[in-house]
Amino acid sequence: MKKINSLITIIIIAITTGAMAQESATASSSATIVAPIGIAQAADMNFGNVAVSSADGTVVMTTGGSTSLTGGVTLPNNTGTVTAAAFDVTGESNYTYSITLPSDAITLVEEEGSEEMTVDTFESDPDTTGTLTTGAQTVNVGGILNVTGGQTAGVYTNSTDLTVTVNYN
């Protein structure tokens, strides 16, 4: 009988000791949804009025909208409206974001025919990363217009889009 009582005592101690050694803790979980990043076109890139000789040339537009010329390109007295492209970026305040510009040239086609020019070597301000200090920032984009000597007169517009992409970092 002593053996049975001892065995029962050992079993009770083992069961209650295991229960007393058990501990638990809890944690909460949460998530914060941030404002989605957005981008909207604010101004089109416009190189204005350009005159060309028989030599090839370029019009280099800065992100600030000023231009410089190379080769057989000149600007007439009436330069027309000259503007860098601008895009308004919105999102979560104080978040940084990356800016992706076209890596390939975009093509401008003369509205009355099939003559073409290209725009390439895009740059932006801010350069490759921006900060939405107040939840908004403007990205200005410049590029280089490549003009062929003797280019046909006319209005040229893009047949491929000037696409700027932004993503949160």
Image: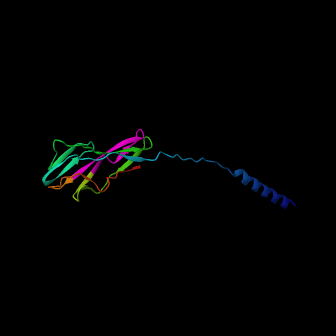
Residue 76 in view in this figure: yes
Please identify the quarter of the rendering in which residue 9 is found: bottom right
Residue located farthest toward the right when viewing the structure as drawn: 1
Q: Nearer the viewer, residue 25 or 83?
A: 83
Instruction: Give the dominant element type of the magenta stretch: helix, strand or loop.
Output: strand
Residue located farthest toward the top when viewing the structure as drawn: 134
Q: Nearer the viewer, residue 1 or 137?
A: 137
Residue depicted at 46% across the width and 47% down the height: 36
Q: Position of residue 162 (x, y in %)?
A: 31, 52
Q: Nearer the viewer, residue 47 or 30?
A: 47
The image shows a total of numbered marks equal to: 0
Residue 27 left/right relative to 52: right
Q: Position of residue 122 (x, y in %)?
A: 28, 51
Q: Position of residue 8 (x, y in %)?
A: 82, 58
Residue located farthest toward the front when viewing the structure as drawn: 112
Q: Is residue 61 in the magenta section? A: no
Q: Position of residue 159 (x, y in %)?
A: 29, 56
Residue depicted at 76% across the width and 53% down the height: 16
Residue depicted at 26% across the width and 49% down the height: 143
Q: How is the image coloured?
A: rainbow
Residue 114 left/right relative to 89: left
Residue 78 left/right relative to 95: left
Q: Which residues are magenta?
A: 122-145
Q: In the picture, which quadrant includes the N terminus?
A: bottom right
Residue 126 in view in this figure: no
